[in-house]
Amino acid sequence: MRRISIALLAALLLFAFGAAGATPAHAQDNTAIAINTKDGTDIFKLAFKIARVNQDVVDQSNAAVAFNSCQDCQSIAVAFQIVLIFSDPAVVDSQNLALALNENCDACVAFASAYQWLLTTDGPVRLTAEGNQRIAELRKRLRDLLQSDLTIDQLQAELDEIRDEVADILATQLVPAGTSGEKQPSNTDTTTTTTTTTTAPSETTTTPTTTEQPSTQGSTTSTTP
């Protein structure tokens, strides 16, 4: 039964992302997948990626999937993706997916949260030294969070704070590529496309999270008492 469930979960991911061939776009997809089939254990998966795109089609996708088929267990998956779009694309078809699922579980918790930013810039840009340092600190903070003993509500609140910090970094720490100075010039333009996607099967209790510019988030939690 567990093998069948995992196969179905994999098929769902493939369906969500389409026919993912070995293309540059799909190589920049970002996925955090936590699959737990061992009783009495916790699994944490984190994915954080910055993708840079200079193509006519933008279809980089982001997904966090947490799946349990065990007793007294927990799976947590968190995915952060930043897509910097240097071109003026004809098609933007990126996906953001958060899926949490329990199957044949007692006393188990599945939590998945996915955050995605799509920024169209006026040509190639880069992060300042300060921006890179702040991103590195956030990566460490995320790793520490996933190993903490926070409740799901506390974890979600911390993730939302990190979301806001990422949004601030993108708003203040991007400069044109090749710029020697570290201050953002006044003529640096960015356009942010925002959508919110929350996906869950009927067996999962889904709690969507309200987001503000410039972030995109999907979050689901499944709890079996």
Image (tube, grey):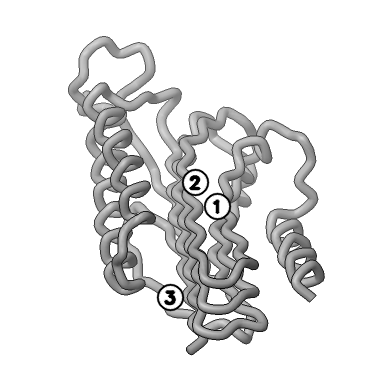
* Rendering quarter of residue 18: bottom right
* Rendering quarter of residue 194: bottom left
> Which is nearer the eye, 76 or 97?
76
- Between disc 3 and disc 2, the foreground one is 2
Report the residue marked by disc 1: 32
Image location (x, y in percent) of residue 187? 26, 27
Farthest residue in the bottom direction?
225
Report the residue marked by disc 2: 47
Instruction: Give the side of residue 69 with respect to residue 75, left or right.
Output: right
Residue drawn at the location 51% of the way across and 78% of the way down: 72
Give the class, few, some or many, for how many residues have Cα within 10 Å of label 1's Cα (few <14, many ≥20). many
Judged from the image, the secondary structure of the residue bearing numbered disc 1 is strand
- Between disc 3 and disc 1, the foreground one is 1
Kind of residue indicated by mark 1: Ala
Report the residue marked by disc 3: 208
Judged from the image, the secondary structure of the residue bearing numbered disc 2 is strand
Split into 4 quadrants, where in the image is the N terminus?
bottom right
- Up the image or down, 93 lies above or below 119; here it is below
Residue drawn at the location 27% of the way across and 60% of the way down: 158
Residue drawn at the location 35% of the way across and 72% of the way down: 152
Q: CA distance from mark 2 to mark 1?
A: 5 Å
Instruction: Give the side of residue 199 with respect to residue 104, left or right.
Output: left
Q: CA distance from mark 3 to mark 2?
A: 20 Å
- For marks 3 and 2 on the same chain, the one whose residue lies earlier in the sequence: 2
